[in-house]
Image (cartoon, rainbow, N blue to C red):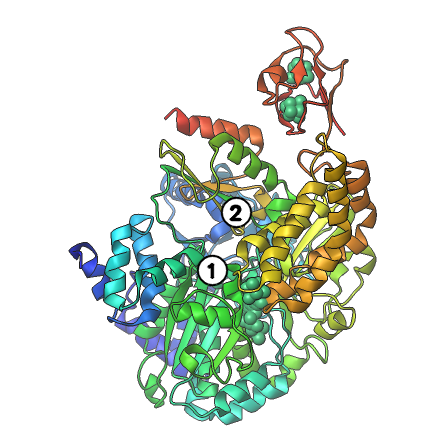
Amino acid sequence: MSTEFVDLLKKYPAGRRENLIPILQELQDQHGYIPEPAVSAIAEYLEIPAVKIYSVATFYNEFRFNAGGKYHFQVCQGIGCQVDGSERIRSELHRLLEIEPGEITADGWFSLEWVPCLGVCQEAPVLSVNGELYAKMTPVRLKELVDKFRNR
Amino acid sequence: METPRISEELQEGLHALITHQQPDSDPTLKFLGRSLRRERVERLTIFIDRTTPTSIYNTSLIEEAVEQWSDENQQISEVIETGCLGLISAEPVIGIQVPGRARLYYGPVEPADIAGMLDAITKQVIPEENLIGQMIMTGQQPWEDIPDWKKHPFFVNQSRTITSLNGVINPSSISDYIAWGGYRTFYSSIRNYSGQELMKLIEQSGLRGRSGSGFLASVKWIKAAGTTSDKRYVLCNADESDPGGYMHRVLIESNPHLILEGIMLAAYIIGANHAIIYTRSRYRTAVKRIQCALGQVRELGLLGQDILHSGYTLDIQLKRGPGAFVCGEETALISSLEGKRGSPRTKPPYPATSGLFGKPTLVHNIETLAQVPMIISKGPDFYKQTGTPGSTGTKLFSLSGKIKRLGVVEVPFGTSLGAVIDGIGGGTRNGRPAKAVLLGGPSGKFIPVSKFNLPLDLDKFNEENLVLGSGSMVLLDDDSCPINLIKNMMDFIRQESCGKCIPCRDGSKRIMEILSLISSRSLPENKYEALDRFKGVTGMLELAEVMQSTSLCGLGKCAPNPLISGMELFREELEEHVFDRTCRARVCLNMRSFMVDPVACNGCNLCFVKCPEKAIIGSPRLVHYIVDDLCTGCGKCFEVCKFNAILVN
Ligand SMILES: Cc1cc2nc3c(=O)[nH]c(=O)nc-3n(C[C@H](O)[C@H](O)[C@H](O)COP(=O)(O)O)c2cc1C
Ligand code: SF4
Ligand code: SF4
Ligand code: SF4
């Protein structure tokens, strides 16, 4: 087993499948994504085939196998935001970054994700970049924001 | 994870507050309780709402402003974090309390306002701008001529029971909860009553599930308690998977100990020694609050072996959900907890007899469990006084969309929809006519304005074949396009379908495609494509019915609800989309048509530069023109024109 993940795995009892998701979550918390070598380490430790791990991990939209972009955009998909025009933000972001949700731009700068209600419907539509919220977005403000990051 | 250690002295006091027959009869305890409840404060105290919605406003600047003011005025002040009163459209909300006087709530507050407000209030002058009202607690002198916060239109018709401490107490402090009587019910239950005795109270209370099922709770409790097994679980479903709702997040962030006490009581009553609280990991603040609360109850010995010498043993674990709508469904949730893909399975067996790891598992919505402490402490007769005979108690709703006063409300079952939308919510934000309300998010149905007098009552809703849902209420006004919303929700279902049943997986995809075609512009379309589009529309309902009747779980079964109710209610608008290819609310992207107003256009050339389709012709200082055939309706020109010269149709 690669030693890199031993410390993390040792916190959980070996061979117990119910710890798969907590382990994946902890990895994702630490790395921002699930590194490939970790999958085989988990497979060995929990005694389940690696394909099963992929099958579980890909089921949930939280898990990623690639690092996010330097600027990770999360656009609120809450119904409140939708009523206030988040669709325009999403389509504009698509156009600006030329990636699908879950993907990352070729230069590694931007990644995209649609997320459930961020709970700030009064400021809709909202999005968050690396955890920081931006309120009352319009396509124009979005463009400015992306440009600002691009020029950093 | 760090939990602030509770000093031994305080621990002793807290134990006494929990275990003493009548804490108020003991002067020391009474004093302690009053201080912890902050009925008496010794210095200027500022309460700042720190729940998720406030993260947008950088509330630490408010805190800094308080500190700066205190330094400059040589005043000692204290800042206390609180949860959310519920009135989210007034965020950031703060409370200000000077010794001896009632607490004043304000919102929205800007950091720049702070110095002026504190200057005035410490001189006993009350600024009325953005005032929500005063909260008068025992032994405090009220401010003259200042309204009680409960008289505020957002609060006046609410019946705050499970949310009564939201925005009042510090959610990261167990002392706050205990000072308000917290964990006394749990203590007296495990010391003085058997599970069976308490079960009677749950039965008599008529408690029903708050997740939308409306299922009678006691049926599940009796099953779970009565099934022979070496292990039993209580599973608190705090996944809040409806993308339109946020009431559960607010509840956890504002008063996590109430949820824990509800879980603890349920576990004791059905004889479970293990409980799990499952919330989505994206709810970061909520997760932190629960972790912190769990640390505190363990430290006080309210969880663990032989709790407070009662012989009862219980532990609660927090599990973070990795995000999937379908994992809110109980059997999918259980799969996910077992480390598998979160796909639902057929029922029976129901979780109450065979749930987590095959053991009897009582699965309840967080809001259902939050009712339990009150049912036990006040008794079923008292509990039943609120609500209707069939739906007892209160229900939380989260208001969003085009509503004026946004937030989380708690009203008795039986309150009319209109009383919530128009009374508490204040109607639409811009005073435009309301169109409908969507209750229950992507599994819910639209309710037209003509039915706003309908009481929010589980049986009544069943009778009318409507969906009360888990409590998300989204208001649409005449500026909102229901077709667009239905399309987006179907897209959400398409993404979230676990893929187990073909009708759900492929049906949602197909319906979404049809709706996309309807809601996009008439790009050159040949005869066959046009025919296809019409065929799609006529076949859509049939497809929806197949989804409803053949899907395994509620996700697929209920997914067509918005579509079916929407097609009935918004027939005209749908036909406009299909035949006229227009969206009257001008929401559907690519469906709008744009024109330059020759009078207003000053030829700045900006739209020309910005149009991604090169659909605009014109040169600087001349009136511009949009070539309709090239225009995709993206709206860019409209966004950029500084002279309001782009007209939208
Ligand atoms: C697709 C789907 C999503 C659900 N999401 C939730 C949820 O987020 N929270 C919840 O408490 N119940 C949810 N439920 C209902 C649960 O299956 C279960 O009925 C509920 O937790 C029981 O709680 P109650 O009896 O207190 O209402 C969902 C059901 C379905 C079909
Ligand atoms: S109805 Fe949809 S979500 Fe539910 S089990 Fe079937 S495919 Fe999965
Ligand atoms: S941006 Fe407005 S004012 Fe400028 S050219 Fe275009 S239509 Fe005319
Ligand atoms: S709506 Fe978009 S495509 Fe049409 S003219 Fe304006 S900018 Fe160009």
Percent across and percent down for residue B135 are 57, 60
Chain letter, disc 1 residue: B
Residue at image position (79%, 50%) is B570
Q: Position of residue B413 (x, y in %)?
A: 69, 71
Which residue is at the far left? A3
> Where is residue B532, by image quadrant?
top right
Disc 2 CB within 8 Å of nearest ligand 1 atom:
no
Badge 1 is on which residue? B253
- Within 10 Å of disc 1 (Cα), the crowding (few <14, some 14-19, many 20+) is many
A13 shown above or below B84: below
The answer to whether marks 2 and 1 sit on the same chain is yes
Dot 1 falls on a residue whose secondary structure is: helix
Which quadrant of the figure contains the C terminus of chain A?
top left
The front one of A134 and A24 is A24
Q: Residue at x 54, y 89 (%)?
A: B222
Amino acid identity at mark 1: Glu
First reached walking from the N terminus: tag 2 or tag 1: 2
Could you give the CA–CA distance between mark 2 and mark 1, rounded to whole angstroms? Answer: 15 Å
Q: Nearer the viewer, residue B122 or B569?
A: B569
- Tell me the quadrant of the picture where the N terminus of chain A can be found: bottom left
Callout 2 secondary element: loop
Residue B304 appears in the rendering = yes
Position of A148 compared to B208: left or right? left
Q: According to the image, label 2 marks what residue?
A: B92
Of all chains, the one bearing label 2 is B
**Picture quadrant where residue B460 is located:** bottom right
Q: Is residue B445 visible?
A: no
- Confirm or reject: label 1 Cβ below 8 Å from ligand 1: no
B218 in relation to B406, above or below:
below
Count the numbered circles shown.
2
